[in-house]
Amino acid sequence: MRTLFVPVVLLGLVSCTAPPWTVPPPAPGRLTLSNFNYDHARIETFVTPFPDCGLRAGMVTSSFELPLNGTRVVDTPPDSDVCWRRIEPPLAETRPPGVVPPVPWNRAYTTSGRIVDSQL
């Protein structure tokens, strides 16, 4: 009787676990941007499922002001990252008015449902 008891219990425990072929759905991600350095920072962001921060047709960017000691949270859908950059004001002495130099994008990898904290 004892020789059958242990295999039956083990078989019961194994049947209660999830099958190995089921993969949980990806979770949404989140980027928290904090400004501890600038009086006012103008930020531009967009959410992308692509492997680079290139703007494509139909993508919508979001611009906002982030005051000193301010924080902004950007939620992302599953399988997406956030690209963001601080837009620097043009210097009047070196550039014509209204011309903003290109600023490289930063990328927050939130694809796998990560929560990323980033500072300007």
Image (spheres, rainbow, N blue to C red):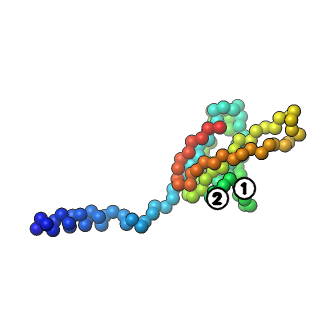
Kindly tell me whether residue 37 is visible in this rendering: yes
Residue 77 appears anywhere in the view: no
At x 64%, y 35%, the residue is 35
89 or 72, nearer to the observer? 89
Query: Residues under labels 2 and 1: Cα distance?
Result: 10 Å
- Residue 31: give x, y in percent of width and height: 59, 46
User: Which numbered disc flags the more N-terminal residue, 2 or 1?
Assistant: 2
Q: Quadrant of residue 94?
A: top right
Q: Position of residue 39 (x, y in %)?
A: 70, 31
Residue drawn at x 66%, y 49% as measured from the top left: 83
In this figure, what is the number of numbered marks? 2
Secondary element under disc 1, as helix, strand or loop, is: loop
Local crowd size for mark 2, using a 10 Å CA cut-off: few (<14), some (14–19), many (≥20): few
The location of residue 107, given as percent across then percent down, is: 63, 48
> Callout 1: few (<14), some (14-19), or many (20+) C-alpha neighbours within 10 Å?
some
Residue beneath the point at 69% across and 47% down? 105
Give the residue type at disc 1.
Leu
Amino acid type at image mark 2:
Phe
Picture layout, residue 24 above or below residue 101:
below
**In the image, residue 28 above or below residue 93:** below
Is 90 on the left-hand or right-hand side of 18? right
* Quadrant in which the N terminus is drawn: bottom left
> Residue 76 appears at what percent x and percent y?
59, 53
Which disc, if any, is residue 55?
Answer: 1
Circle 2 SS class: loop
Q: Which mark is residue 50?
A: 2
Q: Compared with residue 4, is residue 117 higher up or lower down, i.e. above or below?
A: above
